Structure formats: C-alpha cells, structure tokens
Amino acid sequence: MIIGYARVSTTGQDLDVQLEKLKAAGVEKTFSEKKSGLDDERKELAAALEFAREGDVFVVTKVDRLARSAAHLHQIVRDLDKKGVGFKVLDDASLDTTTRTGKLVFGILASIAEFETALRKERQMEGIAKAKAEAEKKGEPWKTGRPVTLDHELIKALKADGRSVRLIAKAAGCSPSAVQKVLTAGRGPD
C-alpha cells in the first residue's frame, strides 16, 4: 500500500496542493494535519507511521512537510526501514529508499545527522566546561539548570490562606519541596 502524509503549519494554509500530488502519485491512504513541524504531538503523523506495514511505501511531497532536521528525518526513515516500509519524497527523486541510489543518499544523510549531533553535544560540553571554570574562578558554586526565583510572600500568603503544599507549589510554579523550604525557613529556630 502507498501511504501519504501531508502537513501545513497553520490553519490558514491549504493542504489541497499536497493532497493532489499524493493522489496523482497513487497514494491509497492519506493522513493530513495542520500542525507546526516543531510540534512533538503530531497525531496524524504518529497514526500514519503506526499504520504502515511491511511492503508499504510512505510518501510525502516535500521533506520539510515531514521533518525539520536531518536527525529527525533519519529517525523516521530508520523506524520505517525497521518495519520494512519504503520512503519517497515526490519533489526530490533522490530521496527514495525503494531504490539503491535512494538508500545511498539516506545513508549519507544519516551520517550527516550523526555528525551534527556529535558537534552539538561537543559544543554543549565545551559551554558547560567554560561556565564551570568561570564559576570556580569567581569562587561561586556551579549550578545546573535554570535559576528558580521563588515568591516567598506568595507562598506564605497561600499557606496562611490554608492551601496545601501541593496547591501552593502549583500556584508558585515550583516543587513542593521548594515550598517546604520556604515555609521552614520562615519559622526560624524552635
């Protein structure tokens, strides 16, 4: 079976051109949605990938309708390949895993995706090492994550109002343990 996937980013955009191209390519089952490509919750994409069976071919009109990065594309194609499903991009004949040349192109793309990931991780580790060194140089403790600024007055007011620690944490945008620390620190020594 030939399975198609079409996507546009906003509700103001139109899927018609993609749907027509997929139909002309012989697509038998089409999944479509109006979602950002950066959205992790693309239900129709997940349904299309789940629907695909061994021997099927998964088709999109353009690669950017499916993935936003080489790594993301590689992951999707690798998952399809594990299921025995081919992959084609209508607007780029070189992106076709049902051919030897297409498989070669995807192998190259996979290598590029892995290279990009390694470079990104290397830059991230260099940045962390630099930040640690700067903190040590200043005599400050090294902290990871984003700093949390707690509204102590809000926490105390909500507690005085009889709210539970869990509800206070939710309202203050922090963890229940952070609320406990603020409330305990406010009591002073017993």
Image (tube, rainbow, N blue to C red):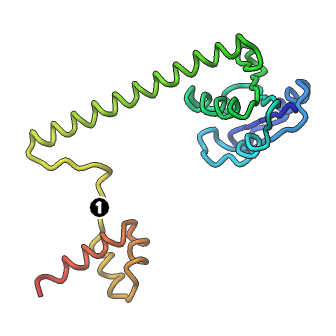
Dot 1: within a 10 Å radius of its alpha carbon, few (fewer than 14), some, or many (20 or more) residues?
few
Quadrant location of the N terminus?
Answer: top right
Residue at the spot x=38%, y=70% of the render?
A: 172
Where in the figure is residue 150, as x and y percent of width and height? 29, 66
Left or right side of 109 for 166: left
Residue at the spot x=60%, y=45% of the render?
A: 40
Where is residue 14, by image quadrant? Answer: top right
Left or right side of 57 for 113: left
Q: Which residue occupies the foreground of this view, 119 or 18?
A: 119
Whether 171 is drawn above or below 130: the answer is below
Where in the figure is residue 146, as x and y percent of width and height? 32, 51
Whether 175 is drawn above or below 74: the answer is below
Residue at the spot x=23%, y=50% of the render?
A: 143
Where in the figure is residue 18, as x and y percent of width and height? 81, 30
Quadrant location of the C terminus?
Answer: bottom left
Left or right side of 140 for 46: right
Disc 1: which residue: 149
Tell me the element at label 1.
loop
Report the number of discs. 1
Whether 149 is drawn above or below 94: the answer is below
Circle 1: residue type: Thr
Where is residue 183, by image quadrant? Answer: bottom left
Where is residue 66, by image quadrant? Answer: top right
Residue at the spot x=27%, y=37% of the render?
A: 128
Where in the figure is residue 41, as x and y percent of width and height? 64, 49
